[in-house]
Image: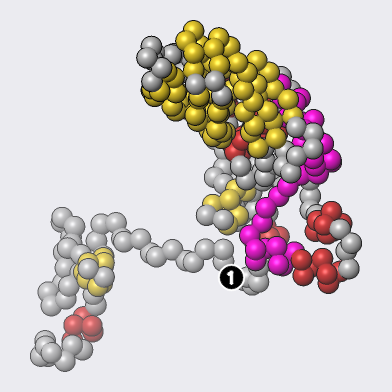
Amino acid sequence: MPDPQFAIVGAEAVAYAAVPQIVFRVAVTSAEPIRNLALQCQIQIEPVRRRYSEDEQRRLADLFGEPSRWGDTLKTLLWTHAPLTSGPFEGTTTVDVAVPCTFDFNVAVTKYIHGLDGGELPLRFLFSGSVFFTDAEDRLQITQLSWSSEATYRLPVDLWQRMMDLYYPNTAWLTLRRDVFDRLLHYKAEHGFATWETTVDALLKDAPPHPPAAPSPPQGGGEGLRNGVLSPSPPLAGEKVPEGRMRGLPLPLVESAGVPEDVPPHPPAAPSPPQGGGEGLRNGVLSPSPPPAGEKVPEGRMRGLPLPLVESDPRRGTV
């Protein structure tokens, strides 16, 4: 039973095709005669099999996230499936596998290859399908290819870049939702722009190159943002704050807020309860406090409340 082996021996870009294509040359070797191969080839990109510069890491952040997370996010990318067929052969034969390529930046493979400065693109080819052969009595037999049939290849990134420059010189593709494209088309027609580059340049004319950085919080004392409102911070240890002002807010800011000068900065404090004898607050009502030890209270009145208050109570009789 034949057990063909595979190896990628080269790749080249097709110069004049309807769409960009790369043709991989696959060498198939078999010790027994093969009548026909009807295979399917799955091509994968293995990003973990190469190194990346700082610029490449920055450009690939949209695809894999921050480099600190690449241990979890740097996974194998499925590029495409391509058919592989051959006629009768014995020993070794070479078969071309054509792979169409896209320059659509919504496709992960395009994002990945475009983010590379150079070097090589690590690929893995997985083969599956049917092998046709004849037995000793010249009867046609069929068998399935082993799942271990695979090959690796390192495609030069420069080959991809030169191919895209050939088909799309100094251009790049960007897909938009139809409603966004209709708005952009209306803007282009309304302003009379001749090209899409002029239209996008006009939209980006006033855009800053980078978003402004957020203000850093104050160090030490001073004003700070609390729930989105500027509020004074507490004084530092050992710092003296003049009476009548808060640290971090000068008096002119407080006076300019429409507060009259004759209004005290704080409401008058409630009188503290008397020490010793006198009235006190009990459940919000002014009530007499018990006399201190040794104090004499005249008969007919309570300590702290004069007799007229008791005599004028209509609920009690005349004392």
Quick one: 108 or 273, which is closer to the camera? 108
Question: What kind of element bears circle 1?
Answer: loop
Q: Is residue 154 above or below residue 106?
A: above
Quick one: 159 or 262, which is closer to the camera? 159
Residue 286: give x, y in percent of width and height: 26, 72
Indicate the amino acid at tag 1: Val
Residue 60: give x, y in percent of width and height: 64, 33
- Give the magenta range: 155-184
Residue 52: give x, y in percent of width and height: 65, 21
- Location of the C terminus (image quadrant): bottom left
- Horizontal side of 313 relative to 135 (left or right) equals left
Residue lying furthest top in this view?
A: 31
- Horizontal side of 303 relative to 129 (left or right) equals left
Residue lying furthest front in this view?
A: 137
> Badge 1 is on which residue?
263
> Residue, x 76% and y 25% (percent of image)?
158
Quick one: 56 or 252, which is closer to the camera? 56
Colour mapping: secondary structure
Question: How many numbered circles are shown?
Answer: 1
Residue 170 among magenta residues: yes
- Location of the N terminus (image quadrant): top left
Residue 34 among magenta residues: no
